Image: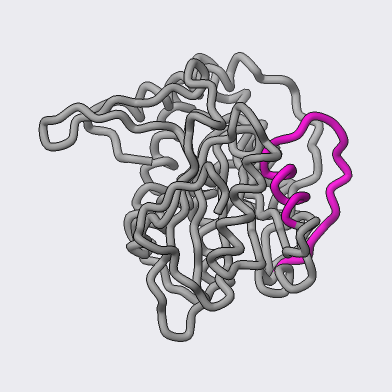
Amino acid sequence: MHPSVRLSVAELPRLDNPLVIGAFRGWHDGTGTAVAAIRYLRTDWGAEEVANLDPERYYDMTVARPHVQLRNGERIIRWPGTRFYVAPSVPGARDVVLLAGREPSLAWRNYSEAIAEVMSALGARQFVALGSRPALVPHTRPAGVGLTDADAALATLLGLETSAATYQGPTGIQTTLALHLRALGMETARLTARIPSYVTAGPNPKAVLALVEHIDRATGRHTSLGSLRGSVSAFEQQTETALDQLDNPRQMRAQIAEMERVYDDSTLDRPRGVAESPAAELPSSEAVIGDIEALLREQRHRPDSSPS
């Protein structure tokens, strides 16, 4: 086993062709939405941590700082890192491994090798990376999800048409890892939720819901969505309140109405998945967006605010 791998159990279980679903906070998930989806699945499914990667090898602690927490009255350190969780088997459903972490600061090739070795030890040959990105989409509609660079088997499993990425430039660990896994003969896919570009203050509950629903369909599982739908309602209320508190809310609401029109006119990928809205020519509203972000951030940190 790779020297950076630390087992959380006596021995890794050997699973039946498990699907690995991963997310990394950073370049491909700046809001933490995809990581929040993994966290939600882990909690609802009762997934158990089986391994983690040594954080000293991959993180600059002045950038990815550890957090101090109180547990049973004792102060403990929660280190940044990457953790593997195995979900309990469910009759008629696919075995699943959940992978969650922060994008590493160092040694990306070594990091990818470590993840590949854990996957191999668990009997996994397929990896789906979850992500999120801002787009010209309204907060008043369901979050769209797009599939990119998926092998045929995974595209069929997820029930979405896949597209090939044409982007060239700086990239994140998601791409680096996927290319490494493919070089080893494994199958990969990227499932990305689109979130409103004017509301990126934290994990987007609507996008979390969309990702979870897609994972349920792919794995044959039935995740409890009650608390997540409650977070969606709270998010919508907070966003509407923030819009009302702007100095000039009409400008932003006019832009949102245009996004709604573009969204509603789009028919691609439905009902198999909500299509990405084409770029709309909207006036710049960076100052307004900043005001909304500040208002939402303030509301989310109030003691009586609903969790997102």
Residue drawn at x 80%, y 44% is 278
Question: Does the segment drawn in magenta span residue 170?
Answer: yes
User: In the rendering, at what x and y percent does residue 167 appear?
Assistant: 85, 39
Residue drawn at x 81%, y 31% is 281
Left or right, 69 with respect to 289, comes to left
Q: Is residue 119 above or below residue 82?
A: below
Question: Does the segment drawn in magenta span residue 103?
Answer: no
| Residue at far bottom of view | 92
Can residue 11 be seen here? The reply is yes
Left or right, 62 with respect to 260, comes to left
**Quadrant housing residue 25:** top right
- Front-most of 89 and 108? 108
- Front-most of 172 and 182? 182
Left or right, 82 with respect to 127, comes to left
Numbered range of the magenta stretch: 160-181
Q: Is residue 244 above or below residue 308?
A: above
Q: How many marks?
A: 0
